[in-house]
Image (cartoon, grey):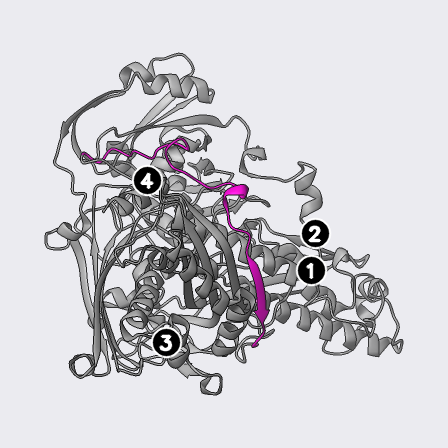
Amino acid sequence: MGAKAASEPFVGRPLARLEDEALLRGKGRFIDDLDPVANAQHAAVLRSPYAHARITRLDPARAVAAPGVVGVLTGADVALLSRPFPAGIDSPVPHYAAAVEVTRYVGEPVAVVVARNRYLAEDALELVEVEYEPLQPVLDATGAAETGACVSDRSFSYGEVDAALATADLVVRERFRFGRWSCTPVECYGVVADWNAAEGSLTAWANFQGPFTLHAVAAGALGLAGSKLRLITPPDSGGSFGIKSAVFAYVVLTGLASRKLGVPVRWIEDRLEHLAASSCSSGRVTEVEAGFTSEGELVALRYDAIEDVGAYVRAPEPATLYRMHGSLAGAYRVENVAARNRVVLTNTMPSGLNRGFGGPQLYLALERTMTIAANRLGLDPAELRRRNLIRRDEFPYRTPSGALYDSGDYEGCLDDALALARYPERRAEASAARVDGRLVGVGIACVVEPSISNMGYITLAEPAESRGLPKSGNAEGCSISISALGGITVRSATTPQGQGHRTVIAQVVADRLGVEPGDVDVLTDVDTSTSPWTIGSGNYSSRFSGVGVGAVAAAAERLAEKVETIRAHLGDANASLRRIAGTVHWNPESLPAGIEGGLAVTAYYAAPNLLPPDGEDRVASSAAHGFVADVAVVEIDATTGEVEVLDYVTVHDAGRLLNPLLAEGQVRGGLAHGAAAALFERHVWDEDGNLLTGSFMDYLAPTAPDLPTPRMAHRESPSPFLPLGAKGLGEGTTMSVPAAVANAIADALGRDDVEPPFTPGRVWELLQR
């Protein structure tokens, strides 16, 4: 490890993942691999069989008396020992870690049995005696919006929307539905909780992926000062895609069981529990009014959105509605935009973070509207978009609702996508196929992909006078140390779920310290008592490549400056890092004046331009904005309704690509999630609120052969506001695929009343109409 060589930087190279050696050999360390505290007892959760019911009797005596059982935690205990979870808006329905007197969704925890092993705990669940008085469930979100189940109703207007709509040559008025779907990571939830009665504190090991705002939510529910809740995440996580943020509710539940029973408690979720009671996306019904001139200029947009967040407003909800607030206009230059946002409760599983987080719902409505308008105006859908896209020379661009789009070449990306897809030929082929009786369609979607969420955007859910202390920004921390022998250790709080954070961090540090990436050890486990985290830390909103890497670069640069200062003092331009480290650790008296001993740095980086909402409810809801242009070609089997994706092209501009190989993986992963929502996955409840998709027999998650193989390309318009110019790109195709596929389906069928997921049965029903 010598002085930095004058060679090509590691950042920007398609380096293979450093994580893969351990993972491929089965040497990863996941939550169920950890045995962090001796004699942990095992928990099983008794769950409500009713969507809405009053608990009239709950007697755990027989379960407590069963062999091997340590004890039982009930909803009454939860109410006694904890507080309701705080959330982004006030709700008339308090949310505890278990049902208190009333159950509000099938699968809600009612009691926790703790025993010597999981088998005994599961057996003892059947011995807990519970009697219910069924109540009428609320399941229809649209109907709920007009009742007491509507817990938030806010309206926003930017520009002269009414006047623009009144003078428009064409007004498109349509309703769009986006159902509820989930994340299905390989690894489900897991918690090990150890209550310390002497200190009044809780240590919990959990595969919790942040954001760490929810650490404060859990601590608040437990009634603990933040320092009294120590949260530790494992080095590896078997996927999340947002859903593991909701582990915080089970950290509280398991922690309360440990507190009541005086033993460490271990709980590992099974797949049936995960599908029924972990978390899922919100559902949305959106009515859109869009005004156009006869030449295709978009002059006004109005949204009326009803958001179904399930049984409770569970943090960070209602964030799904507001994460995209700055991007209500999408990629278009429209100046007049309005929105009405209503949040409703239904007797279904609570919602939470889900990859794309509000983007799929917004862009289904917007991009379907653009295609419908193009058809009615007699324009090609690509041409209508081209006429309205923000132009390259207009960046940085401020949207009507407050977002600051940092950089981009939207028209260039669209051109690349059309060329790669052979768009004119595909359109001609589809038309010819339909003449021959084949149902072939072509669809387009153009979406802006926000990354690095502003911590203040969620406060838009409350009127300005009710927001309290201002919230803003998004920051991350990183620590780097060099040992006496020159070993480099980096600790980050970005809690990766498989994206390759270790590899990119090593690339960034290697460039600045003049070493190889393999010389850099990156620790990805997080301990809230020792790790350099902020309230914004964690893995969400594609923030790693911006603020995560920003913090790494800041720490590495400070350390590199110190190394160079010492190297110059030694008078040896080629002094190795090992020699410098040895000097610092073993001979600190030889250091130049003003240089502290030690080779360890902790640095923080905060993304710019993320102010609190202003007095007119404008907010820069994210710090960086990428762009995605997709073209989908589909064919529908007229007999079965089966949809085949014949071709899928996606072109991204995510600023500077830190590692093109990992970027490709993120695009493919986002596309898989978006295709799942477009073609396969949907949570379904019957008229009594029973979950009909509670196993993989009924909840159809696609496997690799079921997914389209994308053809992709990239443009790089580096962000002028971020240290390395890189933006997030892990969620863009989750946002764009449902809209592009829906447009292709509508094109194939020649009708507008289409909504995902386009399963064979649902498409067959459309064909029968």
Q: Magenta segment, principal secondary structure?
A: loop
Q: Is residue 706 magenta?
A: yes
C-alpha gap between disc 3 and disc 2: 45 Å
Could you tell whether 388 is left or right of 147 in the image? right
Q: Earlier in the sequence, mark 2 or mark 4?
A: 2
Looking at the image, the residue that sits furthest to the front is 436
User: Under tag 1, what secondary structure?
Assistant: helix
CA gap between label 2 and label 4 equals 43 Å
Residue 218 placement (x, y as % from top left): 37, 48
Please give the residue where the numbered disc 4 appears in the rendered image: 761
Q: Quadrant of the N terminus?
A: bottom right
The numbered mark, 1 or 4, whose residue comes first in the sequence reads: 1
Q: Which residue is mark 1?
A: 506
Q: CA distance from mark 4 to mark 3?
A: 32 Å
Mark 4 or mark 3, which has the lower sequence index? 3
Q: Position of residue 430 (x, y in %)?
A: 43, 60
| Residue contact between numbered discs 1 and 2, judged by CB atoms under 8 Å | yes
Q: Is residue 37 above or below residue 384?
A: above
Q: Which residues are magenta?
A: 688-717
Q: Which residue is mark 2?
A: 18
